[in-house]
Structures are given as C-alpha cells and as structure tokens.
Image (cartoon, rainbow, N blue to C red):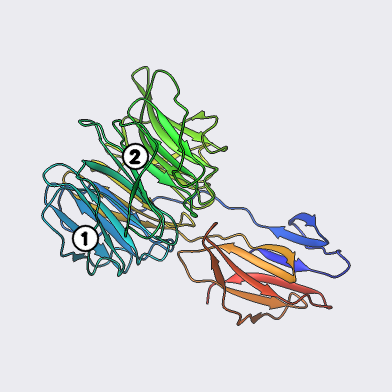
Amino acid sequence: MLVVGNKPNGKSRLMKAKILVAFGVAIFCGFISAPAQTWTQTIAPKNSWYSIASSADGTKLAAVIPYANAIYTSTNSGATWASNNVPAIEWWSVAASADGSKLIAAASYGGSGIFTSTNSGATWVSNIIPNYAWFAVASSADGARLVAVAGGGQDLGPIYTSTDSGGTWISNNAPASHWISVASSADGNKLIALTQFNYYTSTNAGNTWTSNGIPSVTWTSVASSADGNKLVAAVIASGTHHIFTSTDSGSTWITNNASIVRTTAVASSADGATLAEVELNWIWLSTNSGVSWISNNVAGSWHGVTTSADGAKLAVADAAPGGIWTLQNTPTPSLSIAPTNGIQLSWLITSTEFVVQQSFDLASWSDITNAPVLNPTNLQNQVTLPLSTDNSFYRLKTP
C-alpha cells in the first residue's frame, strides 16, 4: 500500500518503507512487480484486425478491419462490440482521445479518407482532406490535435495535422515519403513520424519537423508517453529486429533486450513505464521502460496493440485467424504530493477506480470527496487540498 504523509514540521516515519523527502513532505513509495500475462479472447468477430485504440482508462476501444471495410467499437473493455456505420473502404488505423469520445480513423487503398467521431463511434463524418493513402493517425488527449501520415510501403505521401478535431487540416512542412507510423504526446505538441528508413520529430504540433534518421535501420512502429519524452519504436537493423527506446524525445536511442521476430505494433503507458510489443505468435511486455521484457506465446498473428494510461489494461488485435484479446492486471498507482496553494495530490488515471483517503493517525481513514480533475498534458488525476495544521496522510484505495 502506498501512503503519502504531510506533516507541518517535515518529519515522518513509516517502518519498512522507502522515504523521499522534498518541500517538507515525506512520500512513502511502494514497489511494483511485473504482471502475469493472462489473455482473454473477446467476442469480437474473427477477422483480419489491423489497428486498435483505447481510452485512457481502457474501457472504450475502437478497432478496424481493412479487408472487411469495418470499424468496431466497445464501451465495456471488449466485453461486447458494435459495428459502426462507416463507408466500405479499407480502414487502416484508428486513434482515440483520453475519454474515448473522440475517434479518428484512416483509410488507404480502395477509397482513402479520414473520418472522425465525437460520440465514441456512434456516428462518423468525413473530413475534408486530400485523397492520399492514409496509413496511420494519432490524437492528443483532448482529441483536438490530430495528425495523419500517408504513404505506407507503396506510395509517397504527406503529413497533415488538425487543431480542431478534424474540422480543418493543413499540410505540414515534411517531405513526401513512405510514412508508416506516427505518435503524439498528450498535449499534441510533440510528434514523431516514421518513414521506412528515417524518422522525423516535431515539438510544435507539426509546424516544423526535424530529420533524426539512424543509418541502416528500417522503422516499423512507434509509441509515446504522455509527455512525449519517452518513446518506444521497432526497427529492423542489419536484417535483425530490435526494440529501441528513447528518454529524450528521440534525440538518442538504446536497443532493448527483447528477442523479437517481426514487430507489427508497439504501445506505451502514459508514464512510459509499461511497454507492449506484438508480433507473430508473441506478445511482449515490459514494466520498466524496456529494461527487461516478459513474453507470452498466444496463438495469433498480432497486428495491433493498445494500453490504458496506467498500463494495466491492454488489448491486442489479431490479423489471422482473427479476433481481439484483452489483458487486465491490477494497477498499483503512485500517489504524488506537491505544494501549491495548499497541497496537490496527483496520480495517473487508472483502469480501475480508486478513491483518495485521508488519515490523521494512520488508523482511521475517510474518503476525500473533492472530485479529481484530469490534467490532459500528463493524464494525471489531480486534487488540491488546503494545507492541514495537523499530521495528514493520504492513500489511494479501491472503493
């Protein structure tokens, strides 16, 4: 159990706990172990699923089937699925806002286009955007800033961005290329886009781009933490597949120790600690930002993966024989405290409901009724409380 203590004189003690002291506040930190992998197949139709997206809490999912020309959505973590009323075109990629209400889907080959939804997929509208082979899309947490890349492995295409949830789009100052993957920070400012043999980054929502290519590698997929600092990408170097991670928005990369065969997709939690990678017959997870990985041999040709913000709820899409599988672990959120006009408690939005409790003696606890406010820049729930003149301790607890 994690307990945060606030004591006016800055002195606190809890046995058998690691203590970090800053600003006169003692923070008692728990330790998180790697989750076991127990995957469950949902009742989603058996078809060639290619891309899947999730809300921050993992309850709302959206997935696309290019060759069946369909988009399916779920509002209960994959327990049930609904087919969306969309045109019969080859849907290739999908992305979601943090609350899952705003969706963007891209189609390429056989009638391309960008479509958006503001009601979790109940209805869709076609965006006014040139007719390219749109291959990948990404969204900011609020769903206002969108990015779409075109090209894939067959054609040359541009990068377009929107700041009004797809109402209008502008072409970015990036070269026409075989763009295959794109990722965004929660605020939409930091972007990374992959071509087959290079990658570009932007720190101003796509207004300008910088080439950061690493020679002799082929990029295949990329994902980002909420702040855009931590990245995970799959590459092929000298004929061998690797997972690369970065902690400085792509300026430098290190090769991770994962025995992968052929990566089709990667995903990242909001804090960049939990990473997921899928390939033929294998699903790999890391809970320490890629330092070590655990694998699960689940039959399937995995082509898409998504995770909740806390990394505890994941979903993977199977291209053959088809289907969608989910994994639910028990989250162990960290509670942080910082001085404001009082004190501010923060924790990453979780896939399981938690409530904040307060105690003055570590014996009796009471719920704090202040509603948390979601910070869209880092996907942290935040509660601001007045500074107490008494000893105060706080914890997160499931209801």
Regarding residue 167, the answer to whether it shows in the image is yes
Amino acid type for the residue under numbered disc 2: Ser
Nearer mark to the viewer, of 1 and 2: 2
**Nearer to the camera, 175 or 249:** 175
Q: Is residue 373 left or right of residue 42?
A: right
Query: At numbered mark 1, what does the secondary structure look like: helix, strand or loop?
Result: strand
Residue at horizontal 46 percent and vertical 37 percent from the top: 201
Task: Relative to 83, say whether 237 is above or below.
Answer: above
The mark total stands at 2
**Nearer to the camera, 273 or 31:** 273
Q: Position of residue 122 (x, y in %)?
A: 23, 69
Residue at horizontal 49 percent and vertical 64 percent from the top: 350
**Nearer to the camera, 50 or 5:** 50
Looking at the image, is mark 1 or mark 2 earlier in the sequence?
1
Q: Position of residue 51 (x, y in %)?
A: 27, 48
Residue 319: name its quadrant. Answer: top left
Amino acid type for the residue under numbered disc 1: Tyr
Q: Is residue 121 left or right of residue 56?
A: left
Mark 1 crowd level (few <14, some 14–19, many ≥20, 10 Å Cα) = many
Which residue lies most toward the right here? 9
Give the residue at mark 1.
72
Give the residue at mark 2.
181
Query: At numbered mark 2, what does the secondary structure look like: helix, strand or loop?
Result: strand
Residue at horizontal 78 percent and vertical 77 percent from the top: 361
Residue 13: name its quadrant. Answer: bottom right
Q: Which numbered marker is on residue 328?
A: none
Q: Position of residue 121 (x, y in %)?
A: 25, 65
Task: For marks 1 and 2, give the CA distance.
Answer: 21 Å
Q: Is residue 296 left or right of residue 367?
A: left
Regarding residue 40, the answer to whether it shows in the image is no
Residue at horizontal 44 percent and vertical 62 percent from the top: 142
Q: Position of residue 263 (x, y in %)?
A: 33, 34
